[in-house]
Amino acid sequence: MLRSQPHPIIGDGAMGTLLNQRGVAFDDCFDKLNLDQPAVVAQIHREYIEAGSQMIQTNTFSANRYKLARHGLENQTAQINAAAVELARRVILASFKDVLIAGDIGPLGVRLAPFGRVQLEEARQAFAEQIAALAGAGADVLIIETMTDLYEVVAAIEAARHVAPHLPIIASMTFTRDDRTLLGDSPAKVAARLQQTGADVIGVNCSGGPSQILRILKAMRQAVPDAAYSVMPNAGWPEQMGGRIMYPAAADYFHEYALAFWQSGAHLIGGCCGTTPAHIQTMAQAVQTADPKTWSAAVPAAAAEIEDNVPDAFQPTQLAQKLAAGRFVIAVEMDPPRGVSTHKLLAGASLLSDAGADVINVADSPMARMRMSPWAVCNLLQRKINVETVVHFPTRGRSLLRIQGDLLAAHALDARNVFVVMGDPTAIGDYPEAMDNYDLVPSGLIKLIKQGFNAGVDHAGTEIGQPTSFFVGCALNLNPSDPAQEIKNLRRKLSAGADFLLTQPIFNPSVAQAFLQFYADQYGPLPVPLLAGILPLANARHAAFLHHEVPGINIPADLMRRMEESGENGAAVGVQIAIELIHQVRAFSQGIYLIPAFNRFDYAAEIIEAVRAEG
């Protein structure tokens, strides 16, 4: 049907968008207009044909008995579908042009087993009823479109092959922002399955705009290079403005993409939601006037843009991008709440974000005390405050089974910055007799994430489907009692794939620099960014506790003396000391890891604002 054409066939664009623009409400039954207001539908068909469409789709996207039943019209399924084909034929005859009629078949609007109650045989029967009416009325081709479920599209193809074996089938799926179907299938899997099931043309439609559609087309062709392909993008991602659904991509944006689609193997090019006759005209003119020999010069902008345009789930996190760009990053630690109330947490995070914090680090059961799960807190902060987060992920107390499940949960909730630590022993916390075992040390967990999950396999080597895209940090003590052992552990973490380092609180930068120089003398400069720990002192008693009771923290005598002399101004002096320390650690760090004492986020905000003001 398509391969013999010297140029791609140009389809039409959106039907629903134009009907809505002409006063039809989105909750009305568009399909019944074939009977009640045929002139409105006919005018849209006519405009697409005049714009250059060589194939128009019948106004039957929702004309199956399940969707029609919502309007009490299930008994008119055959009549509505037949009327749509006849309407399209009359418009084509009046145009005196050679235009194909594609019988449009959309999703049933119900969930199929095993994810719903409608059995596959029931789905096949519903599709068969609609297809029989379209074929009997004289459709030239069938287009099964905007499908999200492979089970459903296969059922539709099987029904078509049984009811109308003489008609070519275009089977088109839609994808989410992460280039997966709603049920998680990849473009490669979709293309292989559709070809195996018997689709004559493999398609992708709706989804995002041309950028995403081109990316998916390339992935499909790589998996199944010999198939015929159809592309019908939306006019960008929809936005709601003033109570209306708006699509941002203008018609002229589609010119280069039409050529890029053709160059990338598309045999049928059209549009979906938000596209108009103007979009179709732009693509038709681009294709009809282009010489394939000039492709390499004609579409560099589109091609270059697409290569760099990866789905959101695979984009580097904001933290990763800032560190890669050499920005001085400010991370601030927050503890999850002990109960279900999150009001104080959100207020504190909002204050820190407004002050200029880049990320909020969410601890996991600090001091082995019961707290809300950190990945839930991360998701909450990212949704409510729009600030990126780093989820702390201790290995202690987690079996290998639980570790992997928790990682998947974190990624699904978009907590993709992970700080791997051993974790505090349960003996010091609320439940001293709780399980304290672990299957992986931090370097092992880093390896599992970076070399396993981020490659698409679990610890056993079994595929997990879409690879994760974690950005992984680990701990570093710059004042260790055994420097050789600390360096040995650091080397293991770096070898496993650690992306950045967070240090314990630093009070003596010269000691920290000496340790880093000791490392550099043996192995060269650190290969990953380091964020220096900064813990603002609250008062003299707080300083004494840290100095005498917390391993790895040693506060110099001059700082201890300043805190002892501060009296009631201890917090203000602690803030000033923190700012001074930040000036000094800039020499060897790419940011700070601010740890507010006693949840005094106001002091942390004061420090952040002072640092940002200095640039």
Image (cartoon, grey):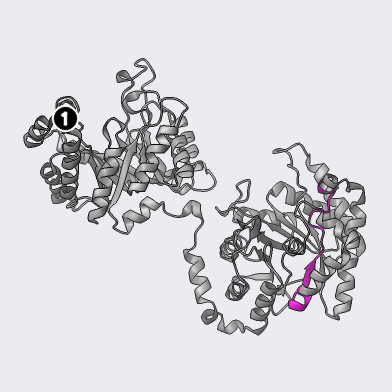
Instruction: Give the position of the C terminus as an image quadrant.
Output: bottom left
Query: Residue 58 in the image: x percent, y percent?
Result: 82, 63
**Residue annotated with mark 1:** 568
Q: Residue at x 59, y 67 (%)?
A: 249
- Left or right: 424 in relation to 517: right
Q: Quadrant of residue 367?
A: top left
Decide if residue 447 is in sight here. Answer: no
Tell whether position 543 is magenta: no
Q: Is residue 70 above or below residue 545?
A: below
Q: Quadrant of residue 382?
A: top left
- Left or right: 127 in relation to 434: right
Query: Residue 371 in the image: x percent, y percent?
Result: 41, 26
Q: Nearer the viewer, residue 469 or 380?
A: 380
- Left or right: 127 in relation to 187: right
Decide if residue 517 is in sight here. Answer: yes
Query: Residue 565 in the image: x percent, y percent?
Result: 9, 31
Q: Is residue 309 above or below residue 553?
A: below
Element at badge 1?
Answer: helix
User: How many numbered dots are placed on residues in this image?
Assistant: 1
Instruction: Give the position of the N terminus as an image quadrant.
Output: bottom right
Residue lying farthest to the top in this orientation:
433
Tell whether position 55 is magenta: yes
Q: Residues within 10 Å of mark 1 (few under 14, many from 20)?
A: few
Q: Nearer the viewer, residue 533 or 289?
A: 533
Q: Amino acid at mark 1?
A: Glu
Q: Which residues are magenta?
A: 48-67
